Amino acid sequence: MPTHAPEASAAFTALHGTHSSVVLEVRPHEAPLWRYWGPRLPDHCVPLAPLRDGRAIPPSSMEFDQPLTVAPTFGVGWYGQSALLAHRSGRQFAQQFTACRIETLVTGQNMAIHLTDSVAQLRLVLHMALDAHDVLQLRSELFNDGADVLDVQWLAAGTVPLPGDAQAVRSYTGQWAHEFQLQVDALSRSLWQRENRRGRTSHDSFPGAVVTTPGSTQHTGTVYGAHLAWSGNHRQAMEWLHDGQYHWQMGEWLAPGEVRLGAGESLQTPTLFASCATTGLNGLAANFHATVRSRLPWPGGRMRPRPVHLNTWEAVYFDHRTDDIRALAAAAASVGVERFVLDDGWFQGRHSDQTALGDWWPDAAKYPHGLQPLASYVNELGMEFGLWVEPEMVNPDSQLFRTHPDWALQLEGRPLLTMRNQLVLDVARPEVADHLFTQLHTLLSNVSIAYLKWDMNRDLTTAGDALGRPAYRSFVHALYALLDRVRTAHPRLEIESCASGGARLDMGVLAHTHRVWTSDCNDALSRVSIQRGALQFLPPEILGAHIGPAPAHTTGRSQSLNFRAGVALSGHLGIEADVRHMSDEERMALGRWVGLYKQLRNRLHTGQVWLGGDDEGDDGVLWQAHGDANASELLLLVYRTTPTSHRNTPPLRLPMLRPAALYTIERLDPTPPDWTSSPLNDAALAAGAQQVLPPTAHGAWLAAVGLPLPRMNAESALIYRLLLVAP
Ligand code: DGJ
C-alpha cells in the first residue's frame, strides 16, 4: 500500500505582470500549491515558509493536509471542485498527480507544468502565462497514457484562487436583443456556478465573470475577472474552501460521452484569460482590452480605422429589390458610410426566414446578373461591399437539405428540432466543411467582398454526429477551422461574428474574426447597458454599434438622433436605418454624427475606457470616457437614461484625470440633446443645448467637484473633449 511521499523541500515559482503576481509552491511529487494570485509583489518576495509548515491538522480531519493546487483532483483527499473528472469504464475514477516538472519558457512570465499520474496513467500539462497587461492565461492538456479508454467528464481550463474577502460575483444573463444583463450575487459558503448548454456562447450565459472585494468600485480597489475563450458549452464555479479562500474554475461543459480518449489521445481545453486589477472594474477592463487587442487577427497585422457601416437588415429585411438597394447604397454614401453590408435575403429562394439557408448563390430573380453589379456600384460610390452569410445552417426547405438530409446534426429516433425554421450542419464532417468552404470561396472569388457578416441563428439541440456521438465541441473546433480556411484563402477579408446579435461574442471566436454584432437591439437605452457589459471584457472598436431607426424595431421605443448616435458613437459605428426615407434635415444631422465619429475614432478605439455612474446617487447619468493612459486627451460621453430627480444637475466627477493638470473642455455633440421636442421648450433645456463651459479646469477640481452638466432630457447624450493643456 503506497503512503504519501514525505514532504520534499519546496521551491517557490512566481510570475509577475505589471500590477499582479502569481506564486506557486512546487514539489516534485505533487501538483503545485496555489500560494498567491493578486496585486503585484516585489520581484523576490517569496512565502515565509511552505504552506503545510504553517498550519496544523485541524480536528476531525485527515492526517494528510491537501491545500488547493493548480489542478485539484477528486477522491484522494480533496473535497472541493475537481479540475478533472474522468474514469476508465467506471474504474480509476480518482486521480492524483505524483510527479511534477516545471518547464519555464520565459522566467517570470510563463511556464508549462507537467503533471503525471502514474497510477491512472495520464498526464496533464497546464500552461500558465502572465502577460504585460496582467492577464493570466491558463490552458490544460490531458494525455491518456493508458491502454484503455479514458472517459472525461470535466477538465477545467484552469483553477485559480480568490481571496477570502472576495465579496460578490458580477456575471451576465440575458436573452435575444437583451444581452449582458448584469447579475450580482454575493459570494458565500455555498457553491456559485453557471453553466451554458446551448452549444454556442449564448445570449444568457456569457463565459466570464468578475469578482469584487470590499471597497472596490468602477475606479478603485482589487477585482478579479476571468473569461473563457470558447464559443460553445461552458461551466464556471466558485467555491469556498476551509482555509477561508475561494477557488474558481472554468472550462468546457462536456455532454455525456463527449470526450472518450483512446490510448495515446489527448484533450486540449480552450484558454482561460484571468486578470487581477487594483484599479477597480475599469482597470480590469483595460487589462482585458489590451490582451484582446494584442491577439486580434487583423488583415495585414494592423487594425485599420473602423469603417462606418450601413447594414441593410432593418431597412429592407428580406425584400431585396435592386433599385431600392441601389438607392439605399447611394443614400448611405451621401451620409459618409464606408462599408455597405447586404444582409439576409440575397440568396436563392430566400424570401423569409423559412427557406433557402444552405443555397448560397444569388437569387436569380433579385440579382439576375449576380452580386457583382451591386458590389461594383457600391465600390463606385466609394464604399466597401460586405455580405451576410450563415454557413453553419440549413433550412429543411432548401436544395442543400433535400440533397444531403444526413448533413444536419441529428439523433436517430429523435425529431429534428428546428429553431428559426433551421437546422445545424455537422460542420466537423470533412465533406460538409469542404462544401461550405467551396460555396464561400466561390462567392468571395467572384464578387468584390471585403467583409462577411457571419451569422448563426440558433442553439444546438440533438447535436449528434453521423455515429450518434455528441458533436458540440467538434462543431466549435470545425467552425474555427472553417473561418481560418476562408481567411487564409482571402487574407484581406474581415469577418464579423454575429449570432442573433450577441450570442457568439467571446475571445474564442475573436481569434478568428474581427468584430462582433453586439446585439440585435438598436434601441439606444437598451444598448447603454448591453455595451457597458460587453466593455468589461472586449474593447469598443470590435463592438458593432448601429444608429437604428426610431421607433426601434426590437422595443418600439423612440429616441432622438442625438441619443441613438451618441450611444452608438463609441463602438464600431454603423447605421441600420432606411437612410432613403429620412428628411433632408435628419440626413444632414446623421452625416454630422458620422463625420464626428470619423474625427474621433482613433481616440475612441485605441486607448483606455472608463465607465462611471452606476450608483443610485448618480440619478440616471451614466458616462463613458475614452482616453490615453496618461489622461491627456479624453472623450467623454454622458448619457442621461432616466428623467432627473434634481432641480439642479450635480456636476459629474471624473476620477481618472491628472490632478495637477489643466484641461480645456469642449462640447462636441453635433446635434443637441432633444430639448426641442418638449412642448414646454423649457428654457433650462434650451440653455443646456448651448452650455457655457469654463475655459479651463483643473483635473483635481473635476475629480473632486466635477464637470458642470446642463439639464438633460431623459434619453439624451452629451459628448465632450477634455484636452490637457498644462503642465
Ligand atoms: C440575426 C442578426 O443578428 C441580424 O442582424 C440579421 O442579420 C438577421 N439575423 C438576418 O437573418
Image (cartoon, rainbow, N blue to C red):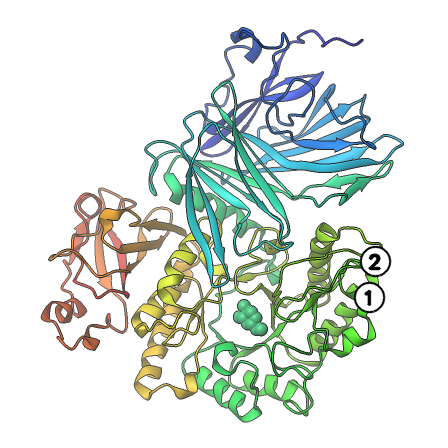
Q: Position of residue 9 (x, y in %)?
A: 64, 9
Question: Does residue 701 appear to the left or right of 421 in the view shown?
Answer: left
Look at label 1 and name its amino acid.
Asp
Q: Is residue 523 left or right of residue 173?
A: left
Asked if the residue at tag 2 contacts the one at tag 1, i.e. Cβ–Cβ closer than 8 Å, the answer is yes
Residue 395 position within the rendered picture, expressed as x and y whole percent measured from the top left: 70, 73
Q: Is residue 591 visible?
A: yes
Amino acid type of the residue tagged 2 in the rendering = Ala
Q: Which of the 4 image quadrants contains residue 103?
A: top right
Determine crowd level at label 1: few under 14, some 14-19, many 20+ residues with C-alpha closer than 10 A: few
Whole-percent x, y for residue 192 in the image: 51, 36
* Mark pair 1, 2: CA separation: 8 Å
Q: Earlier in the sequence, mark 1 or mark 2?
A: 1
Mark 2 highlights which residue? 466
Secondary structure of the residue carrying numbered label 1: helix
User: What is the number of the mark on residue 137?
Assistant: none
Let me know if residue 392 appears in the view: no
- In the picture of the structure, the residue carrying the numbered disc 1 is 406
> Does 382 appear above or below 423?
below
